[in-house]
Image: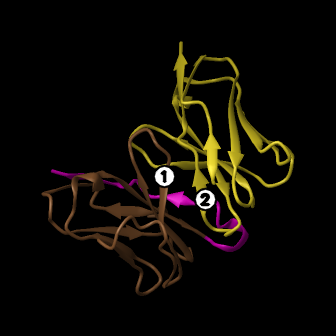
Chain colours: A yellow, B brown
């Protein structure tokens, strides 16, 4: 079956660093995506990994290990506006369909 | 506008009523997706269009759900004889396709409440 696992909720402090993990078991793999979704809003694209390793984009970095079926999203210098849900999604063998995790709700405290 | 737009933003329907949800994708985007998102969950795939062709409708939950994109641009998701379990946010997303197909741009969604 297809399965994407990520923690339901995490709490972190403003200015700190947080790592959100995602593990996946899918019938195929054609890339892993991270999206950010603020409450009541649409998901917005953050990052894309298709090869193993770390992709850095400003305060956000995403890591992928295909052999372990594992990814993480690293957020540095947390700001209050980073409070949102972070969704992990895997593109399967169809090459167009994204299999989505339920999202990790990140709460930032002052 | 440059983004994906959806209308209406909110819809309250009585059980048994038919509804139509509209999506205007980003101009030039060949790929269009419809998703259903329940509270606290990730989006669930409903259907996928490449231009005007509906290539995958495997996620549509029942034959009450129907989607079209007749001219390869605007798309409509129609739900007939709505049921309470249809209450959810319906998201539309578009992408350039090809290698960029996974980079999807989402509209604000239509929140459907069936009473």
Q: Mark 1 points at which residue?
A: B43
Near-viewer residue (B60 or B34): B60
Q: What residue does disc 2 label?
A: A98
CA distance separating discs 2 and 1: 9 Å
Q: Mark 2 lies on which chain?
A: A
The residue positioned 46% from the left and 43% from the top of the image is B41
Residue B47, percent from left and from top: 47, 70
Quarter holding the N terminus of chain B? Answer: bottom left
Is A63 situated above or below B2? Answer: above
Tell me whether the residue at label 2 lies in contact with that at label 1, contact meaning CB atoms closer than 8 angstroms.
yes
Horizontal and vertical percent position of residue B84:
22, 52
Label 1, secondary structure: give it: loop
Residue at point 70%, 59% (across, down):
A27
Residue in view at x 86 percent, y 47 percent:
A67
Residue B2, position as x, y percentages in the image: 49, 63
The answer to whether residue B42 is seen in the rendering is yes
Helix, strand or loop at label 2? It is strand
Look at the image and give the residue range highlighted in magenta.
B96-115
- Indicate yes or no whether the magenta region holds residue B112: yes
The residue at the point 39 percent across, 46 percent down is B38
């Amino acid at each position: 079956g297809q399965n994407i696992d990520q923690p339901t909720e995490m709490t972190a402090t403003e200015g700190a660093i947080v790592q959100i993990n995602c593990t996946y078991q899918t019938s195929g793999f054609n890339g892993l995506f991270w999206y950010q979704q603020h409450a009541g809003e649409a998901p917005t694209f953050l990052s894309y990994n298709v090869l193993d390793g770390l992709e850095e984009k400003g305060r956000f970095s995403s890591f992928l290990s295909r052999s372990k079926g594992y990814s993480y999203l690293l957020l540095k210098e947390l700001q209050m506006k980073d409070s949102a849900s972070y969704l992990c999604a895997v593109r399967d063998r169809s090459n167009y369909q994204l299999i989505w995790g339920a999202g990790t709700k990140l709460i930032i405290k002052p | 506008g440059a983004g994906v737009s959806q209308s209406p933003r909110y819809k309250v329907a009585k059980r048994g009523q038919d509804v139509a949800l509209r999506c205007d994708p980003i101009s030039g985007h060949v790929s269009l997706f419809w998703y259903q998102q329940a509270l606290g969950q990730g989006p669930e795939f409903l259907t996928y269009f490449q231009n005007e062709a509906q290539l995958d409708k495997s996620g549509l939950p029942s034959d009450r759900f129907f989607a079209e994109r007749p001219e390869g641009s605007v798309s409509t998701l129609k739900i007939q004889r709505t049921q309470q379990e249809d209450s959810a946010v319906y998201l539309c997303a578009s992408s350039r396709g090809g290698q960029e197909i996974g980079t999807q741009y989402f509209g604000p969604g239509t929140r459907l409440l069936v009473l």
